Amino acid sequence: MPKDSGIGASSKRREDVRFLTGKGQYTDDVNVYGQTYVHFLRSDVAHAKINGIDTSAAEAMPGVVRIFTGKDFEGIGGLPCGWQVTDRHGQPMQEPGHPVLAQGKVRHVGDPIAAIVAETREQARDAAEAIGLELEELPAAVNMKEALKEGAPKVHDDLTSNLCYDWGFVEDNKAAVDEAIKNAAHVTTLELVNNRLIANPMEPRVAVGDYNAANDESTLYTTSQNPHVIRLLMGAFVLGIPEHKLRVVAPDVGGGFGTKIFHYAEEAFVTFAARQIKRPVKWTSTRSEAFMSDAHGRDHVTKIELALDKDNNFTAIRTETYANMGAYLSTFAPSVPTWLHGTLMAGNYRTPLIYVNVKAVFTNTVPVDAYRGAGRPEATFQLERVIDKAARELGVDPIKLRRQNFITQFPYATPVAVEYDTGDYTATMDKLEEIMDLSGFAARRKASEAKGKWRGLGINCYIEACGIAPSNLVGQLGARAGLYDAATVRVNATGSISVMVGAHSHGQGHETTFPQVIAEMIGIDESQVDIVHGDSSKIPFGMGTYGSRSLAVCGSAMVRATEKVIRKAKKIAAHLLEASEADIELKNGKFSVAGTDKSVDWTGVTLAAYVPHNYPLEDIEPGLEETAFYDPSNFTYPSGAYACEVEVDPETGKVTIEKFAAADDFGNVVNPMIVEGQVHGGIAQGIGQALLEAAVYDENGQLQSASYMDYAMPRADDLPFYIVDHSSCTPCTHNPLGVKGCGEAGAIGSPPAVVNAVIDALASGGKNVGHIDMPLTPHRVWKAMNQ
Amino acid sequence: MYAFDVTRPKTVADAVAALAGEDAQALGGGQTLIPTLKQRLASPATLVSLSAIDEIKGVCKDGNSLSIGGGTTHATVAAEAGAYPALAELASNIGDPAVRSRGTIGGSLANNDPSACYPSAALASGATIVTNNREIAADDYFQGLFTTALNEGEIITGVKFPIPQAANYQKFVQPASRFSLVGVFVAKYADGVRVAVTGASEDGVFRWTEAESALSANFSASALDGLTASANGLINDLHGDAEYRAHLIKVLTKRAVAAAK
Amino acid sequence: MTKISMTVNGRQVTGDVEGRTLLVDFLRENLRLTGTHVGCDTSQCGACTVHVNGLQVKSCTMFAVEADGADVGTVEGQQNADGSLSTLQAAFQEHHGLQCGFCTPGMIMAASSLLKNNPKPSEAEIRHHLEGNICRCTGYHNIVKAIMAASGQDVSNIAAE
């Protein structure tokens, strides 16, 4: 019987009402009295020396307030990188500077050269055209392998090469892995590309900087997933503004998907410029600008080898990946191909020996950083593709091969440094076979063939590590920040509750799900609890939302704070009921004395806390408000099995998704409706990666897919209804709610299913192609089948 | 966008007069022009909006011909061109519903985007492009990429489509823009079959004359079996190379023939 | 500057605009009706969808002066007269047809336009109608479902609830 409130209920989202009626307050809806507008003059070439910037004519244009260039930022910190990776030889990665506005050189199309602040947007843009630029174009480093060759154009002249780091993991396993592969009964090798993507949240980035000289306070309104992280990075590392004088507000944010985690130049610029000109400065990205200034995602070139013994047990995995960093290190870029990728290479399988090598490369392209899944989709894709290829080579059933190699004992320490706490991969696979109706596939294939279409079935498993992250562990791995989160539970006098959380909701529905948890713990109505998020002046220092962490980390902090509240409330109740604290029970919003009919309700206690006329003032303080910080002891490990059926039109190569199912294990689920929505969205992005999306540069570093005219976003008619299930449940063992995280699973789990299905479809039509690189556009599929 | 004025004449005569002004440019539905203006790729002094001119709107069957006003939106054509079902069907798949509410047939033909749908219909139908001062045969009208026989300041007031015995348009969409990666319009008339291809050529819409001959002799998909569309001069881009487009031309032509009604 | 007047959500409004002022800018900047969003500059995402004289249009691809004298509807005018959510809006909430909310105003305007002309659209018709409205969050599943539900169709068999 589904619940109608509390944990496990599909409570309807309270935030929907404002969004459905046009009452959302997004950053572009913020207008500050007297505001100016900034337009960034951006490089239209990938790599050039700046020999001169003449702003004199532009400064005389109507409405121009001031023009800034890199010179204005000399002596001011650059954009910091939040993660330092140590290479195979124990050396720190090469870490170039990242100025707010270009200094000396431009390094990618879109690199900001000058910022024109004017009374209107169009005046700023008019003036930008009057700036005299002397750019001396240089050859560009675009292709990663070329960029590592001797004599390649150097993105950063002060670095020794374009190699950011050469990482080996686990380096001590290398020799054993090499040996195991040499002695294997069978080795399957696959070379593949994990295509470069652009996150494309529907709301483009916006930043509004305001400065109040009267109290020397700066405010930044920004489209961010983590306002406190921005405050810390920008205040401490870029602009030198102490945190108590810097407020960062991320109001309603129209989707993030990772690309709104990072601290961007435009945020630092508007904050800086507002202080300089003593007026608010607003920047609203156009979509065209977003394509060349939002951090991109993925972009790995990988070779993976899977070794099997004569009984088809996996014995070793060796991978070599080139990971594109772009022209600068975005905030968390170095961690994505390493700790968020290498640690997942065991997947759902018992493979005793694994070695992962990653070469991170600077190129004259937009910086690359985390995008939904971040490293884990790259790991899952190569692993699940190579397993499928191995099954095909060995002539065994791909499901059977996977099942045979599943990890079945938990906790399980992988050879790549993480320990899975729980999971049941057989259960999710069983569930998948059921919901996908796999037994009916043969009949469906026949029906497709009757229409002249080739039908294919692709399945895969995934595991991911989320609930990011245990601070002491990530500190050892190079993180320059803690990754705990925080919540303050403020109980008001009449019993309603305001919860200030460090997590940020930009589509995830925290305003609905977080109250479900507290309401359940106390036994009051969900409507009595409100969530406050997104404003550094209102919330405790939390690290925001990414890596499917909000409920597992911030939710745990909220539970801890609520537990503190309940403990104190019980003390107050004990006093009011003249009973021993140990005898007080809280149930359905009522405190009672065990074994008696004496009770006081929730509001009786909360009122007493704030009107302490009859109150144990000698033992406890008045008021009822508690804060907790929660630092997880491990990642959480959601897992699942996905299946996709496609039809391929043999005449055109066009692929259509006919059926898609996902069987996930997210541990305990607070709001099934929202969890399913997260999975739907993730699957759509995964299908987008597999069939449609690609950020493509030409050899000169020009972005060819620079708008929705050429970057194919999944649309309603590209996608089916999805069959999703999360009834397989092995609760996380180390957080209080037993939850795992569901935000990225769909994007991690779906690309290999789609590609495996297309390969299977082609095989059914007699075209045995080993692999096709994503996106599997009609053109690419047709080429592959006609090679 | 650069600054410009927008005028909204109510008659063709007033529009023509307005277009005689310096750097004046006609604005149809604006569905292509406005994005172009946003990129600052055009800098007219005045845009002469044709959207208030009622005399160039509407669909009218005249004997065996369908006349469509140049200012008629795609949505209206989709709804009212039932006398020429393949044309109505084509219109119903241009862009998306919002684009179809604003975009006009005259605007599309005047722009002559190499991936637009309408040029293929006009060329395959042997339509007549009617302007404020002359009539131009489709065969003379399309002159290459974004290039037509229109003179400066000349307005498309209507298009006359001879209604075929059977016709069909096959659009294979470019997955990002949803324009045609390749589109083929086949129209069968008493005096022969015409086949026009959009999306494929670097020179814009063109007729596949070999296919026309084969189909005029035998209007069946199998009549195309021995033919190959040439890849010479076809577009190579992110979404498909010339060879693929050539292949699609044949596949889509066959499908259009099979589906023609 | 040109003086224009139009009806927006039933109210008469006027304003002075430049020729290049887009309808969406007039709505957002002059009228402060910020429910209509801008998600792209190539006329594809549909976040700016409004109704002009009953037709679904992209307000980022129409000049404000061209709406002079028109009857314009935006998401702010979609609720019932008593302020409650319309059937369509309520269905989006009931079926979780939105996440971040940014594309939602455009989706509501597009869907209401569809339902006006096609009161019981099929799944395929809905997906086709939404071709010009991009959502990055929902994977469209619950949007399509919400529109089907708003049109009175049984959606209980659509995948897992």
Image (cartoon, coloured by chain):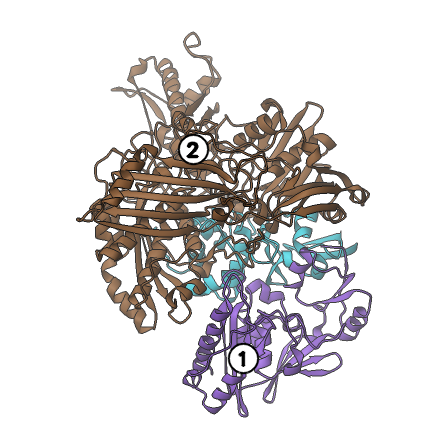
Label 1, residues with CA under 10 Å away: few <14, some 14-19, many ≥20: some
Question: Label 2 lies in what chain?
Answer: A
Percent across and percent down for residue A203 are 56, 47
In the figure, the shade used to draw chain C is cyan
* Residue B206 left/right relative to C94: right
Element type at mark 1: loop
Residue A662 seen anywhere in this rendered image of the structure: no
Percent across and percent down for residue A428 are 26, 46
| 1 and 2 marks on the same chain | no
Question: Label 1 lies in what chain?
Answer: B
Element type at mark 2: loop
In the figure, the shade used to draw chain B is purple
Label 2, residues with CA under 10 Å away: few <14, some 14-19, many ≥20: many
Give amino acid for label 1.
Answer: Gly
Percent across and percent down for residue A500 are 49, 29
Q: Which mark is residue B82?
A: 1
**Image position of B59 with respect to B20: above or below:** below
In the figure, the shade used to draw chain A is brown
- Image quarter where the N terminus of chain A lies is top left
Residue for badge 2? A87
Name which residue lies at 77% across and 48% down.
Answer: A130
Q: Which picture quadrant has residue C159?
A: bottom left
